[in-house]
Image: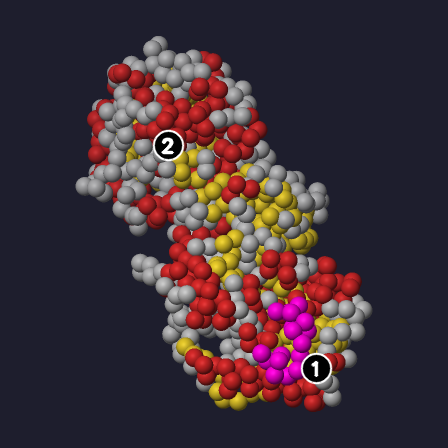
Amino acid sequence: MRDVAVIGVGMTKWGELWEKSLRTIFTETALLALDDAGVDTVDSMVIGCMSSGLFVGQEHLGSLLSDYLGKNPAPAARVESACSSGGLALRQGFIEVGSGLSDVVLVGGVEKMTDVTGCEATYALGTAADQEYEGYHGLTFPALYAMMAVAHMHKYGTTREQLAQVAVKNHLNGSKNPLAQFPFKLSVEAVLSSVLVADPLRILDCSPITDGAAALVLCSLETARKLKKPFVRIVGSGQASDTIALSSRKDLCWIESTQIAARKALSMAGRKVEDIQLFEVHDCFTIAEIMITEALGLAKKGQGGKAVEDGLTALNGKFPVNPSGGLKAKGHPVGATGVAQAVEVVKQLRGEAGERQVKGAKRGLTQNMGGTGGSSVVHVFEAD
Amino acid sequence: MPTPSRYWREIPQRYRYEAGRCKACGFICFPPRLVCPGCGAREFETTKLAETGTVLTYTIIRVPPEGFEDQTPYAVGIAELEDGVKLTAQIVDCDFASLKIGLKVRLEFRKLSEDGEAGIIHYGYKFVPA
Amino acid sequence: MAGIIGYGAYIPRNRIKVEEIAKVWGADAPSYKKGLMLEEKSVPGPDQDTITMSVEASRSALKRAGIDPREIGAVYVGSESHPYAVKPSGTVLAEAIGATPECHTADLEFACKAGSEGMFIALNLVRSGAVKYGLAVGADTSQGAPGDALEYSAAAGAAAFLFGKDDLVAEAVETYAFMTDTPDFWRREYMYYPRHGGRFTGDPAYFKHTTGAAAGIMAKAKLKPADFAYVVFHQPNGKFPFRAGEILGFARKQIEPGWLVNRLGNTYSGSSPLGLAATLDIAKPGDLVLMVSYGSGAGSDAFIWRVTDRIDKVRNLAPRTRDLLDGNKVYLDYGVYAKFRRKIRKAE
């Protein structure tokens, strides 16, 4: 594999974008990335999107989006792995450039979730679970993560307050992110008094429904140097699968696919987790961030709650997690999330993160996850 | 909502708890599969799930998916059955205050949902306190 | 000799009291309680229906019978609240208990008599040798119109009976049926609630057929009321069974063990079958039990059972009827009851 660089990033403000269709949101965002990279031509496009079919009745996104971006006849593919579709798109782009097959690849992620009712959106998100043996029984995603929380709290003594502190931390970071859907601060009391969704998770423990897109331009190191643009290298990529159903997991309190994907990515990068200065992780629910913190090795098994309580993962902590605000404050347009995590890391490594800047950031890690951990994709980035 | 054929295909599992036991390593798959997740072998014999077990984790769903509004709020859980199989299902006929990890449960035949007023009715299993 | 080889009951755990219903409609609870001899009734949860209750009652019957379900040759579900208008409850039941595919199935309806109809047919198929084992279930989740007298009593429950020729729990001594065309209670297609003829449902309907069937079967079997340990009548309310017994010459204590209605309500097709199950739960070997169902429209099926020694071995293999009736109850208020019974108009 040859070296792969990120030479452009693009992201617009996320939220309920009533005026904009899926194709508009994606195209605007992709143009920002192309302009940031200073390129006009791409060898191919890879787009992550969980369910444009269920949300807006549109499949064949590759054709649609290369058409609307004016990049025909470039090959374009849409990839899906539920909520890790974006991370998967990044990995496919990385493989394509790294293998030498393509020189410049546009990686994007998009999801348009607000054209359906909340109930229909919940159903679409639920397709990430086992339809016949979880969904059939009336399970929802908050319920699946709530069960992981109950097990984690029972086994390790993780508390309701520690879960709330994840949301508080991410909103504090998100309040410094002009593109975030919810750039306001939260208190622990506000989280604990918000309405219950699936005990013990409350509405403020859950990431929102969001419209949005994110994009990156990847190219070979050679091309990056020729373009004389500031760039960041992707030095590690890892992906792993686990059972579709939560009940089939070996350990209900552990996200093994993240542990394996992270090991692979770090091994490829020749690094340990202590060498990384910031982490963008998949906090679809507060408990998820706690468990991911453990699976990445930032905290010992069972100690993820204590880690956030002790400020280990705060912006100025030893292992800053979700400086962008995470899924919780930034929003979670499903297919876009994995790409947006990379956008944040690249900005941080380029020193462009403004008030959220992690000082002296040289390396960053993104962790994107599908379902209840059925898939995980991890990437490691390094400043030039 | 499952379509009639998708619903019908799972009847042996949903009504009679039919599972597959790997002939090589004894792992019990529910639902039955082609490849054993334990050892990778491909030969199975039909067996049935044990009908009693212990709750490993649970939650109470207060924001339901479509079709479950009338039952809300309802409890769901993962229980480990006596034969080692871990199963996800609703926990009913149990006061929420009595829900706990370690609760003994058994399987009972119940209605899961309906495809609106004119569609088919979906039956299957739920946990009740044993 | 053919008869019952296993029996089972199922009663949902929700209840609603007469006071709670009366409060909403501005009715006088004490007079309803006294007039109907009724305190409370069972209410099916939103995940319970005639089919789910039939399955669980049948599983209990199978536990007591101890037979291979693949040898069941006939499965009948009698109800006036089958979940589908077209698609049998019997097919779901037969699949759930593992009796398919070599099994005859039909759904039966005849107001509250549909359960005993199935019993009559299944028993006689076994007697004739057409099938080895037959299963009949009486189950209902019937509705009374809001504010109508029937709302106080329309309840939910199921009882299942397996018939065979060996290892009998109760021998079938005699069977009998008595019917006429009497429009005392009916429901037209597409109507949500039934209608009834008020006091016309008494003497010319319930009492004529119940006593007619009882008298007819006793004459056929050359038996008198005193020969019976117990009698089970259809129980639309608490009073009617005792009055029928009085007319025929039965004592209250013969009726009481099978008299569930005061805390169960009228389980329609499940009514006399559940009464029979409750009676078998306490009967002794050698006891003669008379069961008389009633279905509006109208007719009564009658059976005479002789309990065998085997009852003592099997009765504890599945839940007892009165344990289901009195244990683990949850009381609902009218709002939740109306939600569960779909009496609240929702958005399309």
Q: Which residues are magenta?
A: C243-259
Q: CA distance from mark 1 to mark 2?
A: 67 Å
Question: Where is residue A320, by image quadrant?
Answer: top left
Is residue C253 inside the magenta stretch? yes
Q: Which amino acid type is marked by label 2?
A: Ser
Depth check: give the residue in front, C101 or A225.
C101
Q: Position of residue A365 (x, y in %)?
A: 41, 21
Q: Which mark is residue A193?
A: 2
Q: Is residue C259 left or right of residue B75?
A: right
Report whether residue A33 is seen: no
Q: Position of residue B31 (x, y in %)?
A: 58, 50
Q: Which mark is residue B15?
A: none
Report whether residue B83 is seen: yes
Depth check: give the residue in front, C68 or A197.
A197
Looking at this view, name the residue that lies furthest to the top: A360
Quarter of the N terminus of chain B within the rendering: bottom left
Colour scheme: secondary structure
Residue under pointer 1: C225
Depth check: give the residue in front, A298 or A26.
A298
Q: Which amino acid type is marked by label 1?
A: Pro
